[in-house]
C-alpha cells in the first residue's frame, strides 16, 4: 500500500505480536499506538475506517470511530464462525460492514443481523481449483506415487 502512495503513519510490524507473553510485554506500546491513531483520526475525520485483519486491534479502533459517526468496515472477517461465536455481537457493534474473503461468511453474519459482503480473496485466482498431483510432486522432487507426510506448524485458536 505504501508503494501505491499510502501515507503509513505506523508500520504493520508494530502490530505484529503473537502469544500472550509477547502481547503483555508490548501492551503499553500498543495502547499508545491506538490512542495516537484515534487522536489523528479525530483531527483528520476520514470518510471511513477500514480495518484490515488484526481484529483485536482494529475492532476496538472501529468501535471508537463508529461512536464518532465515522463509517467503519472490517476487511477479513475474524473466524467467529469457527470459534468464539459470541464475538459476532461485538463485531456488529463495532463495524458497519464486514468484507468477507470466504463465500459462506455473509450467511453466518446475516443470521446475526450483521451486514457482510463476500469480496473474495486477493490470491484466490492464483490457486487452481484442481491441482495436478503428479506435476506438483515432480516440481517438489518427490516420487509421483507413494505416501507423503507433511509436518506443518500451526497456532491453536484461543479459547
Image (cartoon, grey):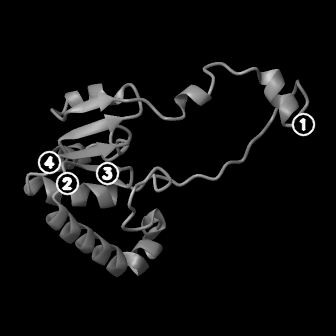
Residues at circles 1 and 3 in contact by the CB criterion of under 8 Å: no
Quarter the C terminus occupies: bottom left
Q: Measured from the top left, where is residue 1 in percent x and y?
A: 45, 51
> For the residue carrying disc 3, how many other residues have a C-alpha within 10 Å: few (<14), some (14-19), or many (20+)?
many
Closer mark to the observer between disc 2 and disc 3: 2
Nearer the N terminus, badge 2 or badge 3? Answer: 2
Q: Which residue is mark 4?
A: 93
Residue occupying the point 88% across, 25% down: 144
- The image's mark for residue 141 is 1
Q: Nearer the viewer, residue 93 or 35?
A: 35
Count of numbered circles on the image: 4
Nearer the N terminus, badge 3 or badge 4? Answer: 3
155 is higher (above) or lower (below) than 43: above
Nearer the N terminus, badge 1 or badge 4? Answer: 4
Residues at circles 2 and 3 in contact by the CB criterion of under 8 Å: no
Q: Which residue is mark 3?
A: 51
* Cα distance between the residues tagged 3 and 4: 14 Å
130 is higher (above) or lower (below) than 109: above
Residues at circles 1 and 4 in contact by the CB criterion of under 8 Å: no
Amino acid at each position: 500500500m505504501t508503494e501505491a502512495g499510502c501515507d503509513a503513519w505506523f508500520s504493520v510490524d508494530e502490530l505484529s505480536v503473537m502469544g500472550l507473553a509477547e502481547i503483555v510485554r508490548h501492551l503499553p506500546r500498543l495502547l499508545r499506538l491506538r490512542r495516537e491513531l484515534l487522536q489523528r483520526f479525530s483531527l483528520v475525520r476520514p470518510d471511513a475506517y477500514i480495518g484490515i485483519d488484526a481484529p483485536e486491534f482494529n475492532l476496538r479502533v472501529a468501535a471508537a470511530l463508529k461512536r464518532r459517526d465515522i463509517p467503519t468496515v472490517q476487511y477479513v472477517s475474524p473466524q467467529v464462525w469457527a470459534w468464539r461465536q459470541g464475538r459476532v455481537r461485538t463485531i456488529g457493534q463495532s463495524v458497519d460492514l464486514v468484507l468477507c474473503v470466504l463465500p459462506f461468511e455473509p450467511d453466518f453474519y446475516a443470521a446475526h443481523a450483521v451486514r457482510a459482503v463476500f469480496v473474495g480473496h486477493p490470491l484466490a485466482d492464483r490457486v487452481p481449483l484442481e491441482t495436478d498431483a503428479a506435476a506438483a510432486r515432480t516440481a517438489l522432487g518427490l516420487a509421483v506415487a507413494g505416501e507423503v507426510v507433511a509436518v506443518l506448524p500451526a497456532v491453536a485458536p484461543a479459547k
